[in-house]
Image (cartoon, rainbow, N blue to C red):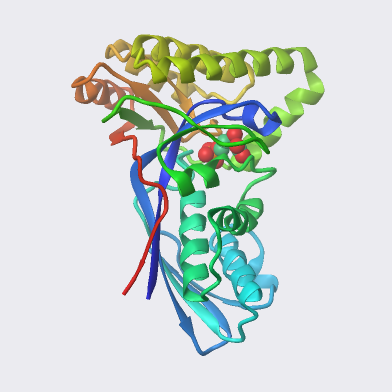
Amino acid sequence: MYHSSAPGKVILSGEHSVVYGHPCLVTAISLRSLASVEVIPEGIIEIISDKLGSQIFNTVEGPSDEGQGLAPIASVARSALEGADAKNGLRIRIESEIPLGAGLGSSASVLVAVASACSNALSLKLTPGDIAELASVGERRAHLKPSGVDVNIALRGGAILFRRGGPLERAEYPKGMKLVLGSSGSPRRTADMVKRVADLAESSRDLFSLSMRAISGITTRMSAALAESDMASVGSLMLLNHLALSLLGVSSESLDKLVNSAISGNALGAKLTGAGGGGCIVAITPPGDEQDVSQWIEGAGGVPFVVSVSAEGMRSWSD
Ligand code: PMV
């Protein structure tokens, strides 16, 4: 059996603007997904997921591939089988600690783990770049125009300043850094939120450009502040970022409420993270104050959880 695991992520600044070529500051988190893959004699792809149930797919694309669910995973497995020119099939088991549709990169972490475990099971000997490309086959099914930020952080871990099509820059962060997350409990589709921003780009060009420039400047400054462990500045920049994202129309009443509650609990800063519209906020606190801020988030109707930034990206092993 071939196993690979990969982390989820939190975007500290640059969601949405990254789709338009601006930088994005993203960290891997201590919640992970695990894929376990075995080659089977039957020419099928069997997927067994702890969160989405089980489904059998053909090794040739067909009507069962409509929609979301497990279909993006099947498309990654199918591309791996094609790459190996294999006539047999794959059984893929998936377990994930990352909540779905919460902006924490669950789909990319699963797809990277699946791409890597399938590649190892089929002896494809892929490079990290090839695994990113294979996982992106599934991401393109799941999202509209994915920037690639989720796949890259799941693969590499730590923190990166990502720019679409550009070289990957490692970002520095304080050792042991913790993040307080607050889930609004409302799922949303990334593709819908990306479309909302694309519509704004058409209808209010000025507002769109202004927000993009603002977010881009915030991201660069936040990366520098993080490298210097200047958490007060990181926090202020997070709040500015939340305002700019609100201008883009991707915040919501419940996300604003959770951001305000974190600040009432003396967080250094907070913002929505990921595509918005629902999903999560992220807050940073002075060291040791994570539980206080979590209680404020809970008081505002959110589900808080504390994660740490994880240096470990994708990991593979077999037994
Ligand atoms: O799917 P999410 O919520 O993690 O959002 C991804 C970030 C976006 O910038 C909104 C989309 C993208 O492809 O980068």
User: Which residue is drawn at the image coordinates 56% and 82% (left, top)?
Assistant: 44
In percent of width and height, residue 88 lies at 56, 86
Height in image: 198 above or below 234?
Answer: below
Report the label total: 0
**292 or 224, which is in the foreground?**
224
Where on the picture, by quarter, is residue 87? bottom right
User: Which residue is drawn at the image coordinates 64% and 68% (left, top)?
Assistant: 79
**210 or 154, which is in the foreground?**
154
User: Which residue is drawn at the image coordinates 46% and 59% (left, top)?
Assistant: 113
The quadrant of the image that shows the C terminus is bottom left
Height in image: 37 above or below 284?
Answer: below
**179 or 4, which is in the foreground?**
4
In percent of width and height, residue 90 lies at 51, 78
In percent of width and height, residue 290 lies at 23, 24
Q: Does 169 sit left or right of 254 as displayed? A: right
In percent of width and height, residue 259 lies at 40, 19
Q: Would you say residue 67 is visible in this rendering?
A: yes
For ligand 1, which image quadrant applies? top right
Q: Does 311 sit left or right of 64 as displayed? A: left
The quadrant of the image that shows the N terminus is bottom left
Where on the picture, by quarter, is residue 203? top right
| Residue occupying the far bottom of the picture | 41
Q: Does 140 sit left or right of 119 as displayed? A: right
**171 or 9, which is in the foreground?**
171
Q: Would you say residue 302 is visible in this rendering?
A: no
